[in-house]
Amino acid sequence: MGFLYSRAGLEEDRVWSQLEGKFGNRDTNDDRILHYAFTELLNNAIEHSQGSRIRVLIEKGMPLAFEIDDDGVGIFELIRSSLHLPSHLVALQELSKGKLTTSPEKHSGEGIFFVSKAGARFEVESNGLKWLVDNTILDQGIFSSPGRKGTRARFELVPGRNRPLEDIFAEYTSEFRFTRTRTVVKLFAHGVNLVSRSEARRLLNGLEKFSEIILDFNRVAGVGQGFVDEIFRVWARQHPEVELIPTNMNAPIEFMVQRVIAVDSAPTRDRPL
């Protein structure tokens, strides 16, 4: 079922009050997750889309799902132009890290990051790209999509199978601050290999805002010495206050990472020239 609204003067809490009954019966935890995700994504469309209308689509069943579709400039174009980034792809990659906002005086940049972790699946489609987060298989992907005006955000939840919001926030916070992020390395790769130092710099851009970074190498086939050295020696030396935690490495990647770490921690006289 779909509902069309004029963006001007729209308030997300009022829309939620009107539509929450359309999702059907659900337990308290599912209700809190739906409420959080719905209002975060609708607020994002209201405050940032620069469009004229917003369409809300609700799907009952397994899973429960909703979509918020606006006719604005597109989220990746808004991020690209506001932060002077080279492409929509780079804007998507930056969004995936968390703590990204085009209005720092109003927003912390945490909303979409935590919404993407809260349900079974989450996707954002805009400016010819789609970012998909599938929490049922702990994977993410970037896909091309037909050109469309505005942004479509979709959130899916499997009733009765969801972690409490407190557990999700606790996974990425310390002393009530958003200090930890999980960066999916393959989102920054062209293909399945990462070789260059420039790729590493794109991956690391902005991550100094966190104190702990989980680098997820799931489905990355190989890495180059320059890529690994840039992360685990050059950047790590520049940011000693940040802990880098690589995970889901295959054997060749683990060898490359451990080699760089071992060389960097060895006494100067033992290091290769």
Image (tube, rainbow, N blue to C red):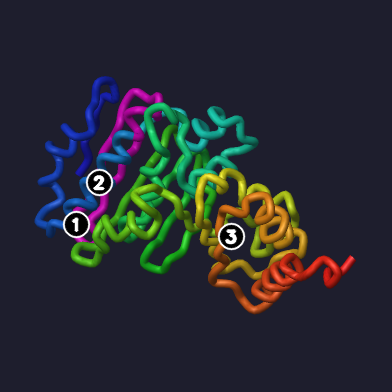
- Residue that badge 2 annotates: 36
Residue at the outermost top position = 8
In x, y percent, where is residue 249?
59, 72
- Residue that badge 1 annotates: 30
Label 2, secondary structure: give it: helix
At label 1, which amino acid type do we have?
Answer: Asp
Residue occupying image coordinates x 29% and y 25%:
7
Callout 3 environment at 10 Å: few (<14), some (14 to 19), or many (20+)?
Answer: many
**Left or right, residue 241 beside residue 16:** right
Label 3, secondary structure: give it: helix
Q: Are the residues tagged 3 and 1 within 8 Å (C-beta)?
A: no
Label 1, secondary structure: give it: helix
In x, y percent, where is residue 8?
28, 20
Examine the structure image and report whether residue 54 is included in the region drawn in magenta.
yes
Q: Quadrant of residue 39?
A: top left
- Residue that badge 3 annotates: 186
